[in-house]
Image (cartoon, helix red, strand yellow):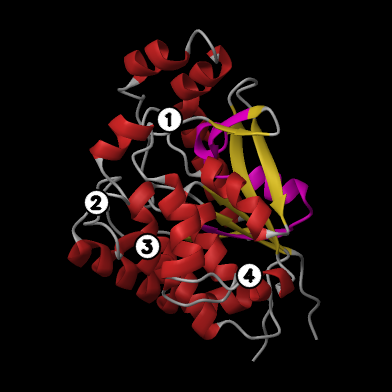
């Protein structure tokens, strides 16, 4: 019997493009052998948010919590942004939904052997931090921070440290996953193969908002596209060496970061599910699952 190598799961962000990720993760819940589990999962922004429902083994929950309340002003609206500083209402998203509207299975999450890390950006240092979440009640603040996009979210202060979107400092934390000992990594992207990120067009606003208090954050925002594209090159090289298994959309995703067309989002979810299914036999071989 072939010994399985330690394997990581890396989930990119991408706002509402994360519907693709939820489809992939739901296929995993349906199809991966019950005795198999990733050693660790690193989620960034929307990837961290959707990892929560995957690790609690609640199929469709990730997709539903992201789309069921799109028409509700309290969930996502520019009125929220003006009133509170958050486009997505934090209390509604991280308290009302998991505790009342679509209850989160905290017990199953805690029993899951996969180590979960939410990637956040420390606004003072500009560096990525990888927060291990064992207790979701307490750790949800880091998930919130990971998904707090600059300019449309308040800075999230945790233990006197300011945090925002993990994607600013490390959009695809493949090297961190390798550093953790994962010899093989499954990476779910929300952009098509061959995509290249361009410079941030909102940098003038970023300078006005953050330069005085968080200059290191601004520096990271300015250079993010360079690091992102370099990471993609690294991923493709690792894929050739058999160390990375990439799952990504087959074509450009025409979805806005705050997309409210549920039909488009449902199609993207289905695309994620079917893409994972089409690659499943190759994935089993990559993971060392026999039979």
Residue 106 numbered mark, or none:
4
Query: Can you tell which of label 3 and label 4 is closer to the viewer?
Result: 4
Closer to the N terminus: mark 1 or mark 2? 1
CB under 8 Å between discs 3 and 2: no
Please state if 39 lies on the left or on the right of 155 as rendered. Answer: right
Closer to the N terminus: mark 3 or mark 4? 3
In the rendered image of this protein, does residue 156 appear above or below residue 49? above
Q: Where is residue 75 drawn, in percent x and y?
A: 32, 52
Question: Is 171 part of what is drawn in magenta?
Answer: yes
Q: Where does label 3 land, which residue?
A: 20
Closer to the N terminus: mark 2 or mark 4? 4
Q: CA distance from mark 1 to mark 2?
A: 18 Å
Which range of residues does the magenta coloring cover?
162-189
Q: Where is residue 17 drawn, in percent x and y?
A: 34, 54
Q: CA distance from mark 3 to mark 2?
A: 13 Å
CB under 8 Å between discs 1 and 2: no
Q: Residues within 10 Å of mark 1 (few under 14, many from 20)?
A: some
Closer to the N terminus: mark 3 or mark 2? 3
């Amino acid at each position: 019997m072939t010994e399985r190598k330690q394997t990581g799961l890396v989930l990119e962000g991408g706002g509402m493009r994360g519907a693709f990720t939820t489809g992939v993760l739901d296929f995993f819940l349906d199809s991966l052998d019950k005795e198999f589990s990733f050693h660790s999962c690193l989620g960034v922004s929307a990837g961290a948010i959707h990892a929560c429902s995957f690790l609690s083994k609640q199929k469709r929950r990730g997709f539903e919590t992201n789309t069921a309340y799109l028409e509700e002003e309290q969930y996502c609206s520019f009125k929220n942004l003006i009133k509170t500083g958050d486009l997505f209402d934090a209390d509604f998203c991280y308290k009302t939904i998991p505790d009342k509207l679509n209850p989160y299975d905290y017990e199953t999450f805690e029993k899951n052997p996969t180590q979960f890390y939410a990637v956040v950006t420390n606004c003072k240092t500009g560096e990525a931090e990888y927060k291990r979440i064992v207790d979701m009640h307490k750790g949800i603040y880091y998930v919130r921070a990971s998904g707090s996009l600059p300019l449309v979210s308040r800075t999230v202060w945790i233990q006197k440290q300011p945090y925002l979107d993990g994607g600013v400092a490390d959009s695809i934390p493949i090297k961190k996953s390798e550093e953790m000992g994962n010899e093989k990594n499954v990476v779910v992207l929300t952009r098509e193969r061959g995509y290249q990120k361009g410079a941030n067009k909102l940098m003038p606003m970023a300078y006005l908002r953050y330069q005085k208090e968080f200059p290191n954050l601004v520096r990271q925002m300015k250079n993010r596209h360079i690091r992102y594209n370099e990471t993609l090159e690294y991923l493709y090289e690792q894929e050739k060496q058999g160390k990375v298994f990439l799952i990504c959309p087959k074509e450009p995703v025409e979805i806005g970061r705050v997309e409210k067309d549920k039909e488009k989002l449902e199609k993207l979810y289905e695309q994620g599910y079917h893409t994972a299914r089409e690659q499943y036999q190759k994935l089993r071989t990559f993971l060392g699952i026999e039979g």
